[in-house]
Image (cartoon, helix red, strand yellow):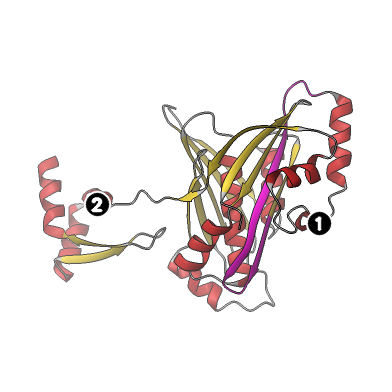
Amino acid sequence: MIKDHISRNITKSNYRIVLVRATHVAQLIGSQQHHLTGLALAHFSDGILAALLLATQLKGAGVLSLEFDSNGPFDNYRCDATPLGLVRAMIPSTTFDKIQAWHESQPLIGKGNLYVGKKIEGAKTPYNSVLELVAEDFTKNISNYLMKSEQINGAVSLCTIVDGNQVISCDGFMIEEMPDTKKEDREKISAQLSKISRPQEIFKGLPEDAIILKRILGEFEPVHIKDFDVEFYCPCSRERFIDNLVGLPRSEIEYLSNEKEIINTQCDFCKKVYELNLKEVFNKKDNQN
């Protein structure tokens, strides 16, 4: 099976094209960590592809966060990704329960909003964009975001295939027009992309990147820039959870301590459980004052 990675490429005709292959990490996060299956697993995995593709647009080190909420059973989602291919994703336990009770007579993802946030190291303020969801399909929502929020002329395709709790493949691409693109090249690329009626055909057989790029670009020759491995990464730690509790009002911490002295808390992303002693929280809070 193809190793999970991001492939960055350009063409001499001023187009930037990025491929993401993320089958293994989608299986790990979506199936093994969050126990999703079927359509919910496919949507979850498409979100991972979208976040990884959009993260390649960051101008420097940082994190891109992709979130949505909806009035359907799949009512909350978040994925964080870096330009170097590190990624994590989550749904709350309440969302999982609603997905489990879902009946196919209603959309899994309903009406709601898409949120894209960019935190660049050294930047004074983060970038945030909010758009209404235009479809249940992640590809259509990300295409709408690129057009309306980024004013990018190009195309994006997210293609996850699942069978029950197994991610068979999780692949996607994004092509962007860069400044000073000639009109004739724009027309040729547009004509080439219009031939792609079913994105699944691009990745059929899970071929090497070069074959996929040929299927997307046609006569345009890509110039390979660099590959990055795609890997799951969660920066959570016991110390972070302690600091979060220290930030609460003292009355709330005292309420927790009346119930029990030691509490267990779980990371929503990686599902790791931490045992926290509230005496340690009080001591750290007192030392800050």
SS label for mark 2: loop
State which region is magenta: 159-181
Looking at marks 2 and 1 on the same chain, the residue that comes earlier in the sequence is marked by: 1
Q: Which residue is mark 2?
A: 248
Q: Position of residue 58 (x, y in %)?
A: 54, 33
Question: In percent of the image, x 77 and y 20: which residue is there?
Answer: 180
Considering only vertical position in the picture, is 35 above or below 91?
A: below
Q: Position of residue 69 (x, y in %)?
A: 56, 57
Q: Is residue 221 left or right of residue 162?
A: right
Q: Position of residue 173 (x, y in %)?
A: 69, 45
Residue 252 within the magenta-colored segment of the rendering: no
SS label for mark 1: loop
Point out the image quarter for the C terminus: top left
Q: Main secondary structure of the magenta part?
A: strand
Q: Residue 175, can we see it?
A: yes
**Distance of label 2 from label 1 (alpha carbons):** 51 Å
Residue 144 is tagged as none
Q: Which residue is mark 1?
A: 198
